[in-house]
Amino acid sequence: MLKKDKNTNIIDLPLLVGILCGAFYWILESMVHVFLFHKGTLMKQIFTPDSHEIWMRLIVISSIIIFGGYAQFIINRRRQMERELRKAKEEADTKYLALVNQAKDGIIIVQEGLCKFANQAMADITGLAIEEMVNRPVQNILVSDDKVLRDQRYKPCCLLADGKTYSGCETKLKRKDGIIRDIEVSTASIQYQGEKAIMGIIRDVSERHNMEKEVLKAQKLESLGILAGGIAHDFNNILVSIIGSFSLLKLSIKPKDKSFEALIRAEKAAFQARDLVRQLLTFSQGGAPIKQTVSTPKFLKETGKFSLRGSKVRCEYSLPKDLLQVEIDERQMTQAVGNLIINADQAMPEGGIIKVRAENVKIAPKDALPLKEGEYVKVSIQDQGPGIPAKYLQRIFDPYFTPKERERGLELATTYSIMKKHGGHITAESKLGVGTTFSFYLPASHKEIPAKRIAPKRLYAGKGKILVMDDEQMVREMLAEMLSCIGYEVELAPDGDEAIEAYRSAQKSGHIFDAVIMDLTIPGGMGGQEAIKKLRTIDPGIKAIVSSGYSHDPVMSEFKQYGFDAVLAKPYQIKELSETLYTVIDGSKELCLK
């Protein structure tokens, strides 16, 4: 059978070769007999040799054919093994290359300072094409920014060039587009194509570092929150007495009186102190947002208009018609978004445009954001200011850090905390000479927008008996004076145990309480959350109002789920007190804007 070897282009004809060799031997033997031994003619020796010569020639020819066939068999077998080995190597190389290119970590092989191999992940990390890396000096591939990384020993190219073995050495890499990425380098000595080489595993850990920074930032806020919560609780109790006293004084002093103007200024200062306490509350473990569903476009436009009163700057809105609603504490979120708009306004003292864009987005695990999976509204607020230097950008949400003069450094930190408490997230991007963009995400809501309550404009005279429970004596006394002023009888209790006893006694005597106002937090005693459960067993129809300036629990935001009918956030004015009692005691006359 004739068979052509595709790899060597040599014809495999062992039988034919053997026959040709035998024929050649037959002719050569005939010539030897004629010319050396003078035995007849050449034609006679070729065609009619004697029997002895025929047998000798046949034995030799058979041996040649057998030996040639065996030799060809060995050669063919070796060629087949070489082909199989080549095929196996090609398959292994293909599988290895596919595996290496699918790896999430960058893989680079360096010989004598030159890159001999790089996978696709390496191209993604550096921003270079694979063709741009192969056979190029490693220092042109693993570039570091001297402004960011000053220690020569930890430059990425040095780690692969010195021949030492490293494991998880963290450093920084400058991509082709100029972006600085945090990387982790591991190296090992290997043999590559028969020569000694260094293999480097490059892992991009920028996202991990960002997540670690978010956790650290949250821990800082939590630490500050422990302090802020305690201060806010005590200070709010003081402000209850101060603001309550101002409310009572305003009732007894005529507006034309000279002292009335001084009283208004003092009250305004007290409200500023209250706003500062509310900022501190956003850092505390309490201060949970009291949420309700609002129209996102309407909220953004109203906040922008309110924040830019008297400014040369104006907002330009891009709000789609199908923009989803958000469920927020409107007071807290107005403060948070207002801080961002005011920050943009201050970045453009000569005037300009703030671009406010919003869109519906769906967050998935692949998005690498510290948010739960689901629907969100993303809002971006972009200014045209000078931008924020990179050295400040990573710290702008830190409490009490600010590059600006005459600021407390709480504004952006407050905004960050409010977003977190709403289950959202905020980011900042900036480019010098171009401007800064703050983007925040808030969970979308499909609930209906409730009717908006009318702010109390006058006192509502009351009639009945009110039980006040608060651990601070000055708060109890101030509440008693305020309630008496609007027509209520008052009984006071310092904690939950005495409040329960007072309520039982009132029931037995037939002079039941029309409502109870309960402080939520009683250090060392029974607070409002536990007390209301027991009071509900005594009187399921009890009218209860929770009042606090600080709480570890979300009772203030979800008060109805905890057995209360209304909430009064400390400190409050006498008008708020009267309106809340009026609504709770006579619920059919609830004041709403229809």
Image (spheres, rainbow, N blue to C red):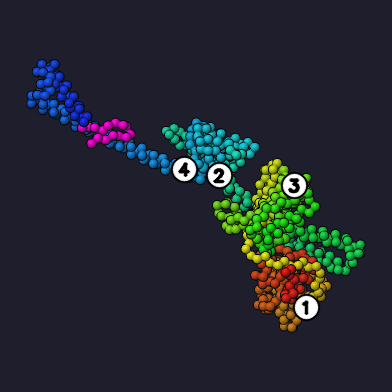
State whether residue 196 appears in this view. yes
Disc 4 to disc 2, C-alpha distance: 16 Å
How would you rate the neighbour count of disc 1 (Cα within 10 Å): few for under 14, some for 14-19, many for 20 or more?
some
Q: Which numbered tag is attached to residue 100? A: 4
- Whole-percent x, y for residue 405 in the image: 77, 47
Q: Is residue 466 above or below residue 52?
A: below
Q: Which numbered tag is attached to residue 208? A: none
Disc 3 to disc 4, C-alpha distance: 51 Å
In this view, the mark in front (4 or 2): 4
Mark 1 and mark 2 lie on one chain; the one further toward the N terminus is: 2
SS for callout 1: strand
In-image side of 175 versus 231 (left or right) = left
Disc 1 to disc 4, C-alpha distance: 80 Å
Mark 1 and mark 4 lie on one chain; the one further toward the N terminus is: 4
Q: Mark 2 highlights which residue?
A: 204
Highlighted magenta segment, given as a residue range: 1-15
In this view, the mark in front (3 or 2): 3
**Where is residue 447, by image quadrant?**
bottom right
The answer to whether the residues at label 3 and label 2 have Cβ atoms under 8 Å apart is no
Amino acid on which disc 2 is placed: Asp
The answer to whether the residues at label 4 and label 2 have Cβ atoms under 8 Å apart is no
Farthest residue in the front direction? Answer: 321
Q: Residue at x 68, y 68 (%)?
A: 559
SS for callout 4: helix
Q: Mark 1 highlights which residue?
A: 464
Q: Which numbered tag is attached to residue 352? A: 3
